Image (cartoon, coloured by chain):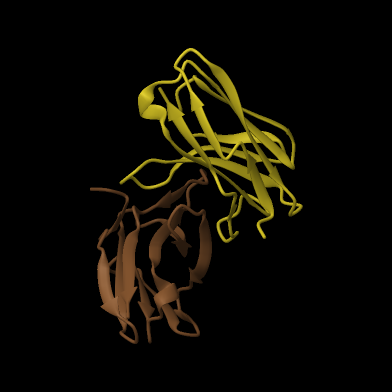
Chain colours: A yellow, B brown
Amino acid sequence: ETGVTQTPRHLVMGMTNKKSLKCEQHLGHNAMYWYKQSAKKPLELMFVYSLEERVENNSVPSRFSPECPNSSHLFLHLHTLQPEDSALYLCASSQDVAFTDTQYFGPGTRLTVL
Amino acid sequence: RKEVEQDPGPFNVPEGATVAFNCTYSNSASQSFFWYRQDCRKEPKLLMSVYSSGNEDGRFTAQLNRASQYISLLIRDSKLSDSATYLCVVISAGGSYIPTFGRGTSLIVHP
């Protein structure tokens, strides 16, 4: 149903682990995003990529490292995370980075940091 | 003051009721406005954009009040399937593209 897929859907990791989240969009869009959604808090925009170039980095700690090898794929590399990083990580895409463009979200990766 | 504020609810209404949510924003330079719907443990999906002249899509009506800096969503003849969290999204002009989400308003429609 969704044109945006994310893997894995669930991830449990220790604070010393290194893992990566993957997002793929099949919509031919030029822009991709990473969001963090914590309980009782609004979605927080983390990174924005347009045509594989990062255009926004919303003051995210360096333990989160994004990578956009092409306009269809987006990764979020994780290392030395903290328990407060446990959240739902959502990927989204839109045609372009434009004020009127609809964002299409993936199902998310539910991350638990022990 | 938070950039985008919503009453978290929950709004608990019977089927067939009319319910309205408001969302206030603090940045007067805000340019685009949207309502997204998020079902429990699912991703957000666009419900409707909010235009300056207001817009209607079936049972849903969205309006923008720039003077008072809020947008509204009206749902008529509520259905059980309308139960969800409704997220307000505001995108501001001025160089940086940063969509700002509200916390969402929870709606529960009961039989």
Image quadrant in which the N terminus of chain A is located: bottom right
Q: Residue at x 38, y 79 (%)?
A: B75
Q: Residue at x 45, y 23 (%)?
A: A61
Q: Residue at x 40, y 22 (%)?
A: A114
Residue A38 figure quarter: top left
Q: Nearer the viewer, residue B62 or B111?
A: B111
Q: Nearer the viewer, residue A58 or B15?
A: B15
Tell whether B93 sits left or right of B3: right
Q: Residue furthest top?
A: A16
Callout count = 0
| Residue A49 percent across, percent down from the top left | 63, 38
Mark yes or no: residue A6 visible.
yes
**Would you place residue B55 above or below residue A76 in this image?**
below
| Residue A53 percent across, percent down from the top left | 68, 34
Mark yes or no: residue B34 visible.
no
Q: Residue furthest front?
A: B111
Tell whether A34 sits left or right of B20: right
| Residue A57 percent across, percent down from the top left | 52, 32
